Image (tube, helix red, strand yellow):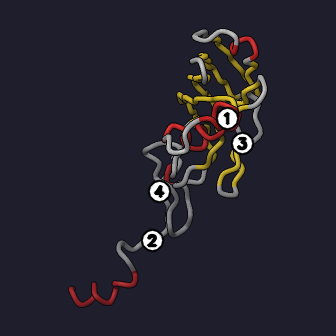
Amino acid sequence: MVKIGVAELKKAPGSQVEYKWEEKWPPLSFEGQEIPFAGPVIVKVVVTNTGNTFLVNGKVNADLNLYCSRCLESFIYHLELPFEEQYCSADFWQALPEDLELKDEIRVFTGDTIDLSPAVREALLLALPMKPLCRESCQGLCPGCGKDLNRGNCECHREDGDPRLAALAKLLS
């Protein structure tokens, strides 16, 4: 997946290195669903040695196969999102004061390799829409016959209003 070798970067505080990956990823797992990618995931990052930590600034581009929450049609959802993470060695993290708020925001790595895959996967999951729509103007499905209203009007007779309130409607007429 997305791994960075930082052995040389460790020796040069203040220096930066750019990386780019383009590879096919397995589907994202979210709330019991598998969300497949429609193409490769592209990750571009700049890693900066800040002295005790490595600051990773990057951008993720990915196309996901989602289903519209109104019409249930499959569509491609494009994500282009920035992310920023800070990494440090396990020794440095242990030396940080327990009450330091920043301690919860720093990710730990061991050895000379930083695995960015969990951070990228987390950024993708957080960017997923709660109710995916194929387009804003999607009309959805007819609640009576189930026809896709984006493809034309349905032939079924629908009564407006809540049928549970029909008795009250008779009183008003």
Place residue 1 in its image quadrant: top right
Amino acid type at mark 4: Asn
Work out whether mark 4 precedes mark 1 in sequence or the reverse, and give the earlier one.
1
Task: Out of 8 and 120, give the one closest to the viewer.
Answer: 8
As helix, strand or loop, the secondary structure at mark 2 comes to: loop
List the residue tagged with mark 2: 157
Q: Residue furthest left?
A: 172
In this view, the mark in front (1 or 3): 1
Position of residue 40 measured from the top left corner of the image (x, y, whole percent):
72, 28
Q: What number is the disc on residue 108? A: 1
Q: Residues within 10 Å of mark 4 (few under 14, many from 20)?
A: few
Quadrant where the C terminus sits is: bottom left
Position of residue 47 measured from the top left corner of the image (x, y, whole percent):
62, 18
List the residue tagged with mark 3: 36
Amino acid type at mark 3: Pro
Place residue 42 in its image quadrant: top right
Q: Residues within 10 Å of mark 2 (few under 14, many from 20)?
A: few
Q: Are marks 4 and 1 in contact (CB under 8 Å)?
A: no
Determine the residue positioned at 52% across, 59% down. Answer: 141
Work out whether mark 2 precedes mark 3 in sequence or the reverse, and give the earlier one.
3
Q: Are marks 3 and 4 in contact (CB under 8 Å)?
A: no
**Marks 4 and 1, how far apart at CA:** 56 Å
As helix, strand or loop, the secondary structure at mark 4 comes to: loop
**Marks 1 and 3, how far apart at CA:** 28 Å
